[in-house]
Amino acid sequence: MTFSLAELAARVGGEVVGDGALEIERVAPLESGGPGDISFCSSKKYRLAFAASQASAVVVGQDEDVPPGRTVLRARNASLAFAKISTLFHPPALAMPGVAEQAFVHPSANVDPSAELLPFAFVGPEAVVGARCILHPGAYVGAGARLGEDCVLWPNAVVRERCTLGSRVVLAPGSVVGSDGFGFTLDMEGEGGSGPRHYKIPQVGTVVVEDDVEFGANACADRATLGATRIGRGTKIDNLVQVGHNVEVGPLCILCGQVGIAGSTKLGTGVVAGGQAGIAGHLTVEDGARLAAQCGIMSDVETGVTLMGSPAMQLREYLRVEVAMRRLPELMKRVRELEKKLEGLEGRS
Amino acid sequence: MTFSLAELAARVGGEVVGDGALEIERVAPLESGGPGDISFCSSKKYRLAFAASQASAVVVGQDEDVPPGRTVLRARNASLAFAKISTLFHPPALAMPGVAEQAFVHPSANVDPSAELLPFAFVGPEAVVGARCILHPGAYVGAGARLGEDCVLWPNAVVRERCTLGSRVVLAPGSVVGSDGFGFTLDMEGEGGSGPRHYKIPQVGTVVVEDDVEFGANACADRATLGATRIGRGTKIDNLVQVGHNVEVGPLCILCGQVGIAGSTKLGTGVVAGGQAGIAGHLTVEDGARLAAQCGIMSDVETGVTLMGSPAMQLREYLRVEVAMRRLPELMKRVRELEKKLEGLEGRS
Amino acid sequence: MTFSLAELAARVGGEVVGDGALEIERVAPLESGGPGDISFCSSKKYRLAFAASQASAVVVGQDEDVPPGRTVLRARNASLAFAKISTLFHPPALAMPGVAEQAFVHPSANVDPSAELLPFAFVGPEAVVGARCILHPGAYVGAGARLGEDCVLWPNAVVRERCTLGSRVVLAPGSVVGSDGFGFTLDMEGEGGSGPRHYKIPQVGTVVVEDDVEFGANACADRATLGATRIGRGTKIDNLVQVGHNVEVGPLCILCGQVGIAGSTKLGTGVVAGGQAGIAGHLTVEDGARLAAQCGIMSDVETGVTLMGSPAMQLREYLRVEVAMRRLPELMKRVRELEKKLEGLEGRS
């Protein structure tokens, strides 16, 4: 597959500076790009790599400085333009319609004939698998679960009974939608007076995953106790993230690797949580909040604020405390010094 | 399935205030409950929701204030009563005895005829699967592993060779019991003098999981180097928790999402660890200790204490340090002020 | 299988003190060791256990004090010697050549005849599986992926398309190599002006896993956006670890449970990261750095340093700040005291 540079520019909305007839065959990083390759330069930080690059063309932003004589594709949003070019060269795999002999589909399930089921994929009773879905080996769709169109379940991804996925949802290998919420209540007497136990609260709700959501490898979203856990349209969830029961994640959120969200918490639109951030249960995090990596959120978060630390503070306060903390040993010395001097003064007076 | 309210009260041990003949068909949250539904109100926080609820009946505690004219089921432990009612309406799925044609059972394995094995479940040589167990697709029981009665292995749950589960153990999708412990020893010379390597210490022990334990999605417990890693009776483990090799978790513990416990640590009875808490190796955490979310435990923990922070402190100390830390920038200012004044005084005297 | 103690000493490079003809049948911990067992004592901490042990022989270091009359095997590196003895008694399982009837191998794949594929293992088109590899149930090798010799994929381990494993690589149950990197770019206009979305950047690179690497249960390494994510020779990765796209982990690193490494970060040789440590993206961590459990690395790390805390500090600074922090409430009191006294002095002068 090749495209002329001019064609790429037309398709992704940019402007060629240099030879638009150049044939482009591949995307490649600046460092390893060669003839026929198009690369991407996002910042002055990579200026040297750009100068040294052998790539035929480079996608740059509107105002990016460029080494003289280089062929570039200028775009308003260079990162987006390059991503779209990469998609042209690497279109997502199309479903090859059909159910492998070694897959299992319950007779009462409804699998669209355009869907692809690989060996060891499993579709349970009354489940629905939409058009052009791909179920890789070990993918599991439980009883009554429903997948929209163009979903991809990578190997060993699990959608438990009655949960629903919208369209174009991607579940990475080992991700789990609809496992039981972690709900127990202490029963001091126990079964027939046999002593204390954690009595399991039935987790009979579901998970509703809206369109264009992506789950990372081994990420989990628990089903609700009653009602539904919700993952909003276009939200992206990274590997090993934990979403507790009855959580509601709004649209367009970004949850980075190993984030944990405890039960019943609500995230608004476009919330970003950095890696390993933790959010306690029963909280509300409003639209556009930014939660730094490893932060610990223990109370409600207002629209658009940036929080850091555990327990989390607003960015400004955090930075001041952080700086002060590092100067704490010195501060202790200064206080000792003050005490000595004051003692001296008191002695004299 | 319907129950009269009086029948529910009799079954779970409560008292009806209002019409005991009311037919109840469903459990539902206060907000969405309607005619035929029974809901639950646990605290004054939900008083408005209670007042607005259309649910036919509501389970409340002994002394809970109730809007006038409402039909309620009063119980000493309202949360437990409601959980039991929910169980009545949603009894756990019963095994449908039989081995699917597409499951694999080694000829030397011993699978109780009342157990249910779904397609792609695997039972290895000499393994034992007890009465009424359910092995969902992709569930794996290794050679010589033993499951008691009424265990449920959700899709892709793994029990490696020689590990044992008691009765009524539940393994959520993707959970792993008996993976190798993380044990290596530095060998500076290496194989035939080929240079440094991490030499693998064989992990030849097992994991012993006692009755009524539950593992969350993608949670892991490693097998012991020698001997056994143990998970005590009735302990509940949430998603993505890591239990290292030779760890001993006592009975009735609660390990929330993404908790990590390093090798050889011992937890007593009823220890509670909040989300993302980490416990270093070779420690002892005594009965009833409460470890806050994200805390970092680096030394032994005494009975019943509550710890927070990383490294963890006792609750009381933590709160004082926490408050002081936030006032640190102000403290620095005050010390600067003191220094100036003192300089002034010294100049004068 | 039995060995004489002298034979063991010869094989692992040690010296017998006592009866070399003693027949050894098993390895066991000091506490449970009995006749025929060999145990291991690594430190004075276990002196009492040693004294009480019934084990026939004990492996000890060169200079270890030993209770009188005990038979020991002295070795320069006692831990390594004991590990090697344990390996003699527990050699890794050998592949039983053959492809189970219920496994799936694509006709275009190349599986070495000495490899063992258990039921429900999957090998995709053009994939290569080397000599003596073992693919347990649910293991997945995607299209064009390549495994060297003697690899073990435990149940439900996943190697996605085009990724490569060297030789003797072990993937624990549920571990995932080659899931998509977490790469999105904000597209404010969206498809046909439909509004904001996170546009997926195609993740078309691979993961290269070198020889002797081990992945823990449910650990993940994402494929690169372009190029390759790399895991260096002999690196050991514990359960639930997250390795982001385009990360390069050098040889002989140790990544403990639940560590997270964000995209494009580079680790040198022999880096050790403690449990739950987090490393931000686009950083360089040089050779031999030691990152404490739960630390948060937000800038480059130099060779050989030890870092603790979040955000991380050098060990020495961390300890001083840590101590000072705990004394902070007291410091506040002292500053208040100073202020009072100074006021008094000022009043007088």
Image (cartoon, coloured by chain):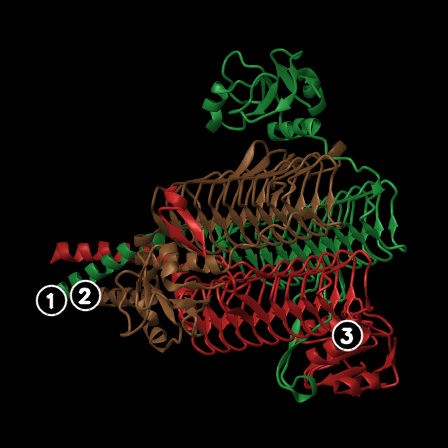
Chain colours: A green, B red, C brown
**Vertical position of residue B271 compared to residue B344: above or below:** below
Give the crowd class for mark 2: few <14, some 14-19, many >=20 residues within 10 Å.
some
**Mark 3 belongs to which subunit?**
B
Residue B139 seen in the current view: yes
| Disc 2 to disc 3, C-alpha distance | 71 Å
The residue that label 3 is drawn on is: B86
Is residue B277 found left or right of C317 in the rendered image? right
Give the crowd class for mark 1: few <14, some 14-19, many >=20 residues within 10 Å.
few
Q: Locate residue B327, reporting x and y percent.
A: 39, 60
**Mark 1 belongs to which subunit?**
A
Quadrant for residue A224, please give it: bottom right
Query: Helix, strand or loop at disc 3?
Result: helix
**Mark 2 belongs to which subunit?**
C
Task: Give the farthest residue toward the front.
Answer: C21
Residue for point 43% across, 59% down: C85
Pick the front one: B97 or A115: B97
Quadrant for residue C337, please give it: bottom left
Q: Amino acid at mark 2?
A: Leu
Q: Amino acid at mark 3?
A: Ser
Quadrant for residue A24, please give it: top right
The residue that label 2 is drawn on is: C345
Query: Helix, strand or loop at disc 1?
Result: loop
Is residue A10 found left or right of C236 in the rendered image? right
CB under 8 Å between discs 2 and 1: yes
Task: Give the farthest residue toward the left.
Answer: A348
The residue that label 1 is drawn on is: A349
Residue for point 21% across, 61% down: A336
| Disc 2 to disc 1, C-alpha distance | 8 Å
**Vertical position of residue A115 compared to residue B243: above or below:** above
Is residue C148 found left or right of A160 in the rendered image? left
